[in-house]
Image: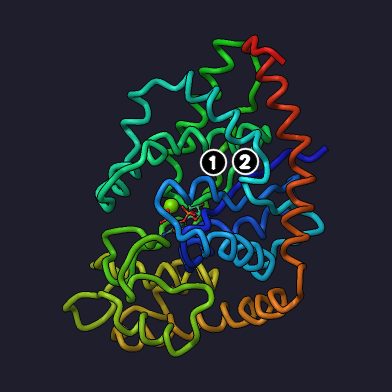
Amino acid sequence: MKPRAFSAVQPSGNLHIGNYLGALKNWVRLQYDYESIFGIVDMHAITVYQDPSELQKKTEEIAALFIAAGIDPQHCAIFAQSSVPAHVELAWVLTCVTPFGWLGRMTQFKAKAEQQESVGTGLFVYPVLMAADILLYQAAVVPVGEDQAQHLELTRDIAQRFNALYGETFVVPQTTLPAVGARIMGLDDPTVKMSKSASGSFHAIALLDPPERIHKVIGRATTDTNPAVDFENLSPGVANLLGIFQALSGWNEEQMRGQFGGMNYAGLKKRVSEIVIANLEPIQARYRALVAEQGYLRKVLQQGAQRVAPIANTTLELVKRKTGLYS
Ligand code: ATP
Ligand code: MG
């Protein structure tokens, strides 16, 4: 049997090129090497308020984008987290073995909490629910963007602590980051990572953005006052644009330097816009066909949940036995 891969996206906004390059593209590449499970983690999304009338729609939209980006729903399970209650049950057990101080060190909590008027406890303990998502499937690898590396380390620590306390139970997962594109930065502010939940209309390129908007947002991207691309002196904004191009083209350093060294920023932005549009157009066309098919996405998500629930429940039963919970 193949080892398992697990990863997920929150239905907390519009999927962007950071999600694509940091996560989805790698999932597509790895999908057949593993028994692959991809979640749409709505329980995570509600750690920050979500419009209830939008959340279900977003969940199906993201399922469609997974498939449109190249995930094969015949081979991989695609499911909504809230359809499999074992995630939340395991999360509670893991919360009990996670020292408070470990969560206090999570940098993403600090960044997200700053943006909220009122911070729900769920936002603080969310990395434990993420650990449960992964450990429930005994995943060997977790392909994510670089911003999730700290949460993955925590997942490993939690798995090891549980195994030490109660005996070998969980596979300790490996983090898989893409070589290029692991951290795409905001186009309006290249000192922060591109995020679905960030405000600002010039922050991100969404996977469903039309070409005109892509030209406009990349055209407005923050650069610097230098006249042209100087590889010995790259500002974060220019490095980010080059990183997007490199991740989409698969070019090596030499090709990048040869093509872009000395090019003015208008030229660079034009090339980046063109390659983004060329990569997104086929995804958008497949997306439109998928959403037009009545009931298809619901079926994919239901079948996905049916496939993963027995795996999740087997792990949960094992955990209950190990911890002495009555069952
Ligand atoms: P939110 O702002 O709601 O947290 P997000 O954009 O961070 O949204 P997530 O659903 O949290 O997206 O993450 C989904 C996947 O995308 C994860 O694997 C994450 O590491 C990856 N990812 C998110 N942002 C980026 C980015 N800017 N660059 C590369 N990968 C990213
Ligand atoms: Mg995130």
Report whether 315 appears left or right of 281.
right
Q: Is residue 162 left or right of residue 298?
A: left
Which is more toward the observer, 128 or 327? Answer: 327
Classify the position of the C terminus by image quarter.
Answer: top right
Ranked by sequence position, the earlier of labels 2 and 1 is 2
Question: Secondary structure beneath disc 1?
Answer: strand
Q: Identify the element where label 2 is drawn.
A: strand
Give residue 246's position: percent from left, percent from top.
47, 70
Q: How many marks?
A: 2
Residue type (three-letter) at the residue carrying disc 1: Thr
Above/below status of 206 relative to 144: below
Residue 286 visible? The answer is yes
Image position, residue 56 (x, y; %): 59, 60
Query: Could you tell me residue 249's position as x and y percent?
Result: 54, 73
- Whether residue 232 appears in this view of the structure is no
User: Disc 2 vs disc 1: Cβ atoms closer than 8 Å?
Assistant: yes
In the picture, residue 190 is in which quadrant?
Answer: bottom left
* Residue at the image position 71 percent from the left and 20 percent from the top: 318
Q: Residue at x 78, y 40 (%)?
A: 2
Residue at figure coordinates x 25%, y 50% from the top left: 117
Name the quadrant of the N terminus. top right
Give the residue displayed 46% in from the left and 33% down from the top. Answer: 153
Report whether the residue tagged 1 is closer than 8 Å to ligand 1. no
The response on whether ligand 1 sits within 8 Å of label 2 is no
Residue 195 versus residue 261: which sits nearer the camera? 195
Residue pointed to by mark 2: 141
Which picture quadrant has residue 263? bottom left
Depicted 309 relative to depicted 264: above or below: above
Say which residue label 1 marks.
175
Task: Give the amino acid at mark 2.
Answer: Val
